[in-house]
Amino acid sequence: MACVALTSLMATIKLEFLQPNPSRVPLDDEGGFVSMESLYEKLSSLQGFVQKKSGARGGTAIRDLEIQIRDFALNAEDRIEMQLSNFLLAKNGEDQQKAYQQLHQTLGEAAENAAELLEKSKETEVVNESEGPLLMIPCLKHASASEPTNFMVGRRGDRERIIDKLVRFDEKLKAVSIVGMVGIGKTTLISSVYQDPVVASYFDVRRWVSMPDGHSLSQILHTLLWTVLAEAEEIKKGRIPDDDDDLAANQVFKCLNGKRYLIVLDNLWNNQDWYVLRSCLPDNYNGSRIVITTRHFLRREGNYVYSNTNIIHNMTLLNPEESWTLFCNNPFLKLERHKAPPIFQEIRSQVIEICEGLPYSIVVVAKRLSKCDNIKQEWKKVAKEIELLGVLDRKTLTHTYNQLPQYLKACFLYFGVFPKRSAINVKLLIRLWIAEGFINPLEGKELESQAYEYLKEFIDRSLILIDTWSSSGKIKNCRMHSALHSFCEDAEIFVSFKLLRILAFVPSSFLQRVPTRLHDLVFLRYLSVSEWFEGLEYVVSTNRNLQSLVVSGKEFQFGAPTLHLPCTIWELPQLRHLKLDKSYVIDPPSIDKDNMRTLSWVCSPHCRAGVYCRFPNIEKLKVFVFTRNNLIILDNLEYLERLEGLSILVSFGCVVTLPMPSMFPSQLKKLRLNGTDLSERDLKAIEMLPQLEVLKLENAFHGEVWKVEEGFCQLKFLLLENKKLKQWTVNYGFSRLKHLVLKFCYCLEEIPMRIGCFGLESIELQRCCPSVITSAKRIEVFKHHEYRTKFFELKIIGEESIPLDDE
């Protein structure tokens, strides 16, 4: 927690006092006012110490110092923000001067305390170094040399695939990495494979090496030596010192050289360990294999270490049927799956929901229930314990947490904010991370891109699961397994209302009842409300650090009056994301908004005369068109050189003129057009966009024929909704199309066969005519028989009530 507290404090110092824009508090050096740069440097040094010592074996001294650092950072940030709040909300000069002096004193005390803690950290490092290096624990060697005895139920498909990868002859030495979250059954799976007669007879030498959490590379290396050379005289007589890593590595290489071997490295988690251990294992081009079980993909300098000589096998959670099979067939209960007693059938759905497909959770529950007489009563106790504490070993999770890079720790704990078993929208998660100050900017990299990389690191480490993908191939929703979620739930901490940074998920009806308290909110960085109301303008205008503003609005009804929002919104210097519903209109800004990255708003006649050039760095733009009285001309889009996503939604009866074909931004990756009246020339221009990956055309053109001569060279996802289209021909386009969705294509004769000649992976049809369904099935047969692919999916929705062509 020390690293999280320091990260938060440093983010507050940087945002409030070290921004290039004028500070909200006019700090100066008169009267010995503390240097904010100096304070920030001290905090950065403390963070470096915590990062270096986190999880290290330094005894109670380091642990006590980390607690002191944590308490200091939490207390300092609370006091600084409270005094800053008092200053900003002061009603007269006297109160403001008093708050200013108190803030001065608080910052000075923070600098002094940080300096004292830095001195203590240096003293601790000296003491720790004098203790010397840690030697290997002798019993570790013997405990890790025994072969596995785990019992496995199910996973037959995984088992067969792993065995095939091990015994299929290939001369090169290959590593098979079994990747998955803790408790998913990696060790159990490879244990079953390891003991299989086919595997046992294929290899000259088989050795199993367990890697306990928290041990050094030297210890692991000597454990490998003991396992490989268990019968060697050098080991029996103690001729190899515990601290001679090079000699140990040479002995391992010498023993295995010339033999076809299978080495299992169970629970490997460190990249550098893998490189050292790999260098100890000879490649005699005889089909030797290394199996690694790990919780995360191994990386080196930001890149995955896997090559064509490495095979990755991702472990997945069990589905409900598999979960129930494991629950019934495990060695503790041994129930018949379809004839389980009624009491077990009653709790079936609850067990499946609570355990979420994690084998370890299922086995733990089964073991508990097997030892009691009152199943129903015991299950209530077990379910409550799992919800509060989880089932995974706290020490293991703590070690996993300590191994995270410093910049990931605060982001990881933040998952505890979201409800258990809930899907988490990735865009929202990233913006909240940024608002909390968890993402440190790197030169040349956007905050959002950097935060997305953080998320992928969690996924690589099997700490976060992918829930759904977006049409562009990015992660749309993610979630944390409840077994890990319990670790992230911090104790309840009182936070003053006036210190809130994020205000979301609160009904506007509730906020309207406390308008006076809203005036105290001066630290908001993320604000999301269900509708605009009186008093909100003051809150927005006084929060100069506001980064994201979302106003959802009531259910939109065409013709209903729209609310004009104040232009003071554009004065927010940190504003990056503005999302307004169809119910709201705002006049364009009169100044450049360099920080803006996403904008969703209702288009007005004012959108001409160089409006979009005010957003030079905009990346995603969504425009609603609802005005019938005026012709809307969407021009100036050519100024949006960084625009990657564009959505234009036109209401029925509205008239909108799109820009000249050459004026579409060339960097567009995602384009959605709804209700537009595209000409053939417009379609040709879209066809030639060089970076376009996602295209959604929803009643966007009214012609009956669509000819694609060439183009769409990068398109991966196409959604086409068109009730009038009859003919669709393709000559040389869509060479990289993976997913095709057709909706309400009542008149379309068929899907072009050429669509299926490349890498198409799925077709989804929603209420399309029979001839379209027939052509889709023809493509399915073609993919399976001609291309022999197993990864093609045809999904048909609403097939029963589709109108015929002549209807």
Image (spheres, rainbow, N blue to C red):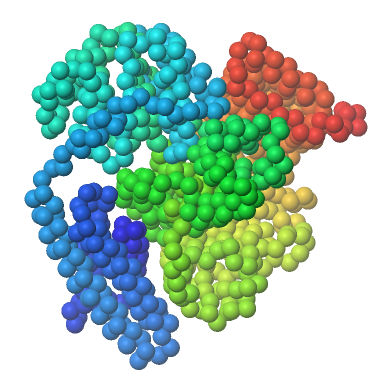
Q: Is residue 315 visible?
A: yes
Q: Is residue 773 left or right of residue 441?
A: right
> Residue drawn at (80%, 34%), measured in percent from left and top?
798
Quarter containing the N terminus: bottom left
Figure check: 40 above or below 661: below
Residue at horizontal 21%, vertical 67%? 114
Residue 154 falls in image quadrant: top right
Q: Say left or right for 728 vs 500.
A: right
Relative image position of residue 773 (x, y in whole percent): 78, 24
Residue closest to the eye, 647 or 708 = 647
Q: Position of residue 656 (x, y in %)?
A: 69, 49
- Is 386 drawn above or below residue 109 in the view shown? above
Instruction: Identify the residue shown where x is 12% and y is 23%.
Output: 237
Query: Which residue is at a point 30% across and 30% down the rendered structure image?
Result: 144
Q: Residue furthest front?
A: 373
Which of these two is toward me, 659 or 80?
80
- Quadrant placement of the C terminus: top right
Check the image and report above or below for 517 versus 761. Answer: below
Q: Position of residue 645 (x, y in %)?
A: 55, 44
Which of the pair 633/233 is nearer the observer? 233
Q: Is residue 455 visible?
A: no
- Outermost residue on the right side: it is 807
> Where residue 803 appears, x then y in whole percent?
87, 32
Total labels: the figure holds 0
Front one among 691 and 805: 805
